[in-house]
Image: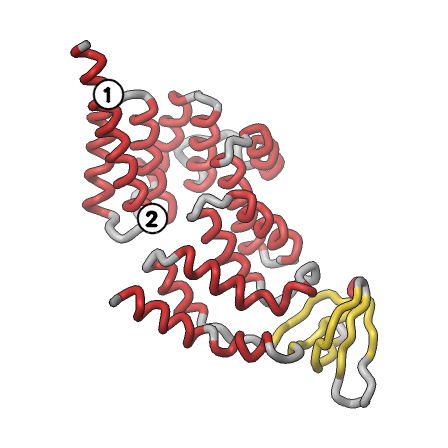
Amino acid sequence: MMKNFLRIGLVLVLMVASTVEAAPLSAELVMSGGRTWRGTLLKRDGEWIEFSTGVSARPIRLGASTIEKINYDVELNLDRLLELKENREFDQLISSLNEVLKPFEPYGDIPSNLTRYRALLMELYFLTEEFDQTLTYAKQIEADAGDDGEAVENAQTYQALALIESGRSDEADALMSRLGWLDDLGEDSDPKQLFLGAKLMSVKKDFNRAMELVAYVIAFNSQNTEWMQPAELFCAEVYTELGMYESAEEVIRQIELLYPNTPEYDKSIILKEKVMEMRALQALEQNS
């Protein structure tokens, strides 16, 4: 019943987008030098874009490289989309967002006001472990965000996470070093940098350093749920990797108690099953 309700809600959220797809795209073009034109994007032919200002009967042709940004007339209920994300309907939300953004694909290489929706897709792809897609969106957002420092840093964070999770530790190391995120990591460092550093060290099998860094997150950033929750899950994962099953189970119990209805909770349940399997295998080996 709940899933049906969510899908109905999502259809209502996307009604505006369905009308956009069926017609030319209303937009404001920000040109080189700051000049703006309001009108309708008609179509794209390679590097040329046909645009109607509504003043002349004939559309004008513009070089894509002369457009600094496109501000589309699109109104999606971002709060509602985030609510659906909180309910962890990730696959359904990815499919629906891709459908929403499809009409804008021909102009996807031009910076636009769609960055926040692409950022949501980037995060969703990471949560569903589609790391190549995560990287694709992260790099596009970093290139398009301009002077939006928060959007750029968020994209760089997901680049680092996706590289680490996909085992590309050398690339992650190079990125994080270039950004200065590995410099002098200690108890006073940014919790994001500590967490990413810990993840990177675990991929490199330096578990002592990994646990040292993640301990700083937990000890000195207990109110920062953005990084505290994944840090605790990471501890449980490392304990499992090291065969410290009792410690892993204790952390998993804390996650189940403190963070219900979160991605970390979902992953902790999967990890708990893995620990049980490893314990059973260990018992068989000891009895044989």
Q: Is residue 179 above or below residue 213?
A: below
Place of residue 53 in the rendered image (x, y in percent of width and height, measured from the top left) = 75, 84
Label 2 sits on what residue type?
A: Pro
Label 1 sits on what residue type?
A: Leu
Q: Please tell me which of labels 2 and 1 falls first in the chain.
A: 2
Query: For the residue labelled by badge 1, is the local secondary structure a helix, a strand or a loop?
Result: helix
Q: Residues within 10 Å of mark 1 (few under 14, many from 20)?
A: few
Q: Which quadrant: the C terminus?
A: top left
Residue 21 is left or right of residue 246, and the answer is right
Place of residue 278 in the rendered image (x, y in percent of width and height, measured from the top left) = 26, 24
- What residue appears at the point 18 percent right and 17 percent down from the top-left corner? 283
Q: Is residue 2 above or below residue 269?
A: below
Q: Nearer the viewer, residue 47 or 139?
A: 47
Place of residue 105 in the rendered image (x, y in percent of width and height, measured from the top left) = 64, 63
Residue 174 is left or right of residue 257, and the answer is right
Q: Is residue 243 above or below residue 181?
A: above
Q: Is residue 65 above or below residue 152?
A: below
Place of residue 88 in the rendered image (x, y in percent of width and height, measured from the top left) = 35, 56
Q: Which residue is mark 2?
A: 263
For residue 281, which numbered disc appears in the image? 1
- What residue appears at the point 37 percent right and 58 percent down from the top-left corner? 89
Q: CA distance from mark 2 to mark 1?
A: 27 Å
Residue 233 is left or right of residue 18, and the answer is left
Q: What is the quadrant of residue 101 in the picture?
A: bottom right
